Amino acid sequence: MGYGMQLIVGIISFSLLVFSNISHSKDGTYLLLGLNVQSGIKEIRFTGERTIDINQNDLLVHPDYILLKVKPGQYRLTRVKTNNRQQAVGFEKELWTFNIQKEAINYVGHISASRAPLLLSFFSQLYIEQENYSSLAWKYMEANHKDMMLKLPLVYQGPGHDEFFTLMREDSEK
Amino acid sequence: MRCFTWIFFIVFSNFSLADFIPPEKLFQNYSVESIAISPAGSMFSLFVNENGKQKLYVSKTDSIKFSQVNFYKPFFLHGAVSVDWLDEKHFTVIPSQSNYSYKPIIVRVDGNEKSGFKTSKIRFKPNLKGVVVAVLPGQEVLLARAYGLDKLDVQLYRLPLKDLLKGKFGSKYKIGPKIDSVISFHASVNGTDIMVSTLSAETVDFWYLDQSEGQWKLLYSKDDLEENFIPLARRPSGDFAVLSNRISDRLSVVNFSMKDELFGEVIFQNNSYDLTGAVYDSIEDRVVSVSYLDHGRFTQEIFVEASQAMFNSLAATFPDKQIILLAADSVGKWYALLTFSSDDPGSVYLLKRKPLQAYLIADMIEDLDGYELSSSTPIRSISDEGKNIEASLYRPIKHDNKTLLIMPHGGPIGVRDYNQYNPQIQFLADRGYTVLTVNFRGSWGFGREFLDAGRGQFGKGIESDILAAYETVVQDHNFNHVCTIGSSYGGYSAMMLAINRPEEIDCVVSMFGVYDLPLLFSSSNLHQTESYRSALRSIVGDNSLELKNYSPIFLADKLDVPTLIIAGMKDKVAHFEQSSRMALRLERLGKKVTSLFFPGVGHGHHFYHHEWHQFLYIDSFIRDATGNSYHASVSKQSKVEDFLTLGRGFESNGVLPKDLEKAVGFYHKAAKLNNPSAMYKLGVAYSTGRGGIKDPEKGRLWLEKAIELGETRAKVALADVYYLGIGVEKNAEAARDLLVSAIEEGDQGAHWKLALFDCLGGEDGSFDFNLCESSLFHGMTQKDKFLDVFYKKYGVDSVDVLNSILSKLFMSDSFSQESERLVLDMIQRRYGAKTYHPKFKQLGYGAFDSDARNLNSPSVDKLDEIPLVKGMQFGIQSKIWGDKKTDGTFTLLREKWFKVDKGEKILVEERFVTPKLGQEYSFIREVDKADHEELGEWQVLVTTLDGEVLTNRSFELVPIH
């Protein structure tokens, strides 16, 4: 679906549960997202080629990792909502954007989202960060999707540049 | 309290104990937080840590007898640890943070030393918020009154103390206009010069109050964090004496002209070191004293004759000690001192000038009195660039195992090692290691050039300096083994030294370290800003391909010695990914790597007991890695203590990362030394399969051996083995005998176990009600209110055990309706109350977090359909209450869980629960397996004892897509 179409019909979001059944997929383009999300987070939204909404139910079923087939292209974290109606928006484009490379498992990092109570206040503060836990992602894929790793390269698309996956691949090929 | 005359000062003779110093004595808080003396010297106060609690005492100086000050709640909020005396009867509490938004806390002291001093807080009108920031001569004070949202905007008042105490702050006392974003104040001793520093987005600004014009004038503005600028005093010329390193390599006393905004003459400079402080007399226009760190030792030079003589006498009285003046009165009668050294955590003294007498007020770590600690020996070496490199060597007092530990510090830029008590070093030295610390290039205190020389020198010049010190040491000392150990940068360095010197280094202990230098730039998206990257580049160098050549992760194949990697899983400084990936790659390359990853820990530990457990493990790791056995002089008991502490530490998450396999390993070591407690632990582990090892035969043998050595708990565990038939024929009689024997030996747990056995009946399903009741309520009379007595006597856990026995009773196949009636009747009699009918309100329902019982809050509100995930919990959150009389007491309810299959309800679980009336309570079921049997409808039914339904709700467990 093109961007223009989205403007006409509004934002179309897909429940992750539709996408998360990847056990029979043999090829394609995948997004691997690590989650380090505290309770109370209700929704995380990425916009790009498609809008990806991760809702409370998704977080319950997939508390640590989300692996889903996506269209290649550029995506950006655009919204984090909590169940007390707090919402973080307005993420600066350059810090929250990532690319999805075709025919690969794209690890885009771990999203940390937590609510830190403010001292002497009834309110809490949303803390959101996209962190690089490549080694944990590597271990997760090895333990849960080893076949997939043999067919598709696991590539790093998180913040900055990282050669860890290449290093591990070289080690395993030795 | 001990008093020492000045002339005949007694030096304690230390004594050496054969065993290790218990680590909990080495790793602990200092006892004294601060000391303050009143202006005329008649009173003093002492802020102390006593058993983890802050306390404040006051006393007269000339007859020391402490009275405790009532601890006001705001003290805690402020995190305050010091006070300032306003006169002989009043003191103010100084907040630890730059926040002026609290009411000033001023305490009046009444009474006398005989009856004890009484303290009372002065009350101010509600709108006054601020802090007394300085006590000035002539009974005046400087009050900073807070304004603005961030409470850092202040109006200064200079007013007589008597008016402050009466709450009179007329505008006539205002000095200067309001000033924003204040972070610190400075008033000269005579009160003529007042300066403040303020913080803006990019600069720290220093302001001088021109009292003739009533205006704040900008003295200096700095945007370089590495630049120091500390105003000392205004000179008669109108210029300022400041501590600065702007025009000199080393931090020095320099003249600064506000008019020309220029630094001028260097008034005082040390030849080798940055100054750490200076006192300047603005009337005499001269430097009174300076201090610096000479080879890490706090050193003071005094240029006023009278004071110099006193400090010379002090130095003679406390030989080899470093001395810091902590407080003084305004009349030169009383002083407070801290004396310390590398082998002494320190002591606080009250010093009377005439006649000279020193009173010991407190030892900073009293538990270490009598233990001999290792003192540092200075090592001087020359770097490859011809610079002096200062290092320190700590030799073991006893148990020398001929192993050198090279211990680089963190940072690496602007951090340093000090010549003072360090619990980690003392722990290692006490266990027989020699420890080498090095102030390599980049360390603070040796001037800016030396500091800057460390930038971009990861794995290069810094390690070259460390090796220069190492080579100096090995010229004079022989070691059988050399290992490296360090935290943060020191962790990186420990790894790099072993990679670069494989033939000399035998093992590595790397804590909270970095191993992949390019990853420093890519560990978080928040690190992608130019300001962060620029700050990082100034330390590590450009993010170029070259960084890979100095990153242990890319050099891992060269690391061929046993390596221990320790990290905090919440570390954001040396991001946890650093340690995680290093450990993973070493593991995959088949290297000898062990990791200790602490959940919930950041860049280092918050609690000392975590740290000492960690160091016990480090000692054990190095012994294994180097083949060092314990020195013959170490007692068996001391070794057993180590193994048991480590075993226990690994048993539950928190102290050490939970690792039952490791726990069992340490219990084996202790059991080999004939320790019955370890044998019991092994018996339980092998019998139950905890720790991944199930061998009932071994389990039984260990338990029997422990019993032989008098371990009562092993009897209770062996009773389980016989009762349940774990690897043996079931034998209820043998089980009972063991429990009775354990009860005779005073084991409370055995009572419960016996009650469980007696109430659940024998193999044949027989149920002896009287036996069950007498076992359950052993030692209680009919009059006792069961719950109250048990909560008070045995705590919540015991009641939980009792509830679980009752639950098991009700779920037992052999339990008849008649038995149920009897037991319900018994519970009502024994619980001391009639069946209670509380009010019940459902607050929410759905899926819960894993620690739901603590959170008491459903993470998903009102969700009837629950996706089936193993370990997930679901249920109801409720509030249960009675009336004013009963709220706060416990009630007893029945919670039943049914599985509904084709319209038929099957009871799966029944519990007795004891919610506290007036509070929230959650009724929760955990999904312990994710298979088809769990799918479908579930019902929870909560009733009173006599069956009144409080709630009944259905849930649908659905498959995940």
Image: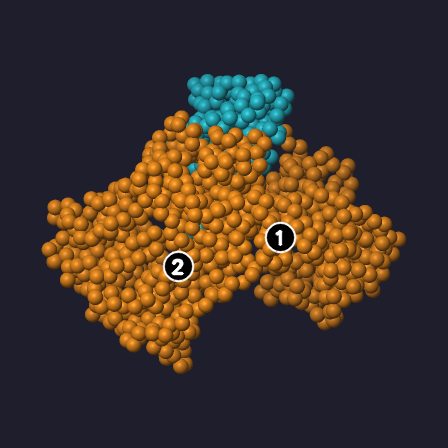
Chain colours: A cyan, B orange
User: Does residue B794 appear in the picture of this structure?
Assistant: yes
Q: Residues within 10 Å of mark 2 (few under 14, many from 20)?
A: many
- Picture coordinates of residue A161, whole percent (x, y): 43, 27
The residue sitting at 49% across, 54% down in the picture is B396
Query: Can you tell which of label 1 and label 2 is closer to the viewer?
Result: 2
Query: Where is residue B489, by image quadrant?
Result: top left
Q: Is residue B364 left or right of residue B636?
A: left
Image mark for residue B394 = none
Q: Which residue is mark 1?
A: B643
Which of the two residues, B771 or B315, is positioned nearer the viewer here? B315
User: Does residue B88 appear in the picture of this structure?
Assistant: no
Q: Residues within 10 Å of mark 1 (few under 14, many from 20)?
A: many
Point out the tag, 1 or 2, that comes first from the N-terminus.
2
- Picture coordinates of residue B623, whole percent (x, y): 57, 47
Q: Is residue B340 left or right of residue B593?
A: left
Quick check: B332 above or below B496? below
Query: Where is residue B443, by image quadrant?
Result: top left
- Picture coordinates of residue B121, whole percent (x, y): 36, 69
- Picture coordinates of residue A152, whole percent (x, y): 56, 20
The residue sitting at 63% across, 51% down in the picture is B647
Q: Secondary structure at mark 1?
A: helix
Q: Which residue is mark 2?
A: B341
Q: Are marks 1 and 2 on the same chain?
A: yes
Amino acid residing under circle 1: Phe
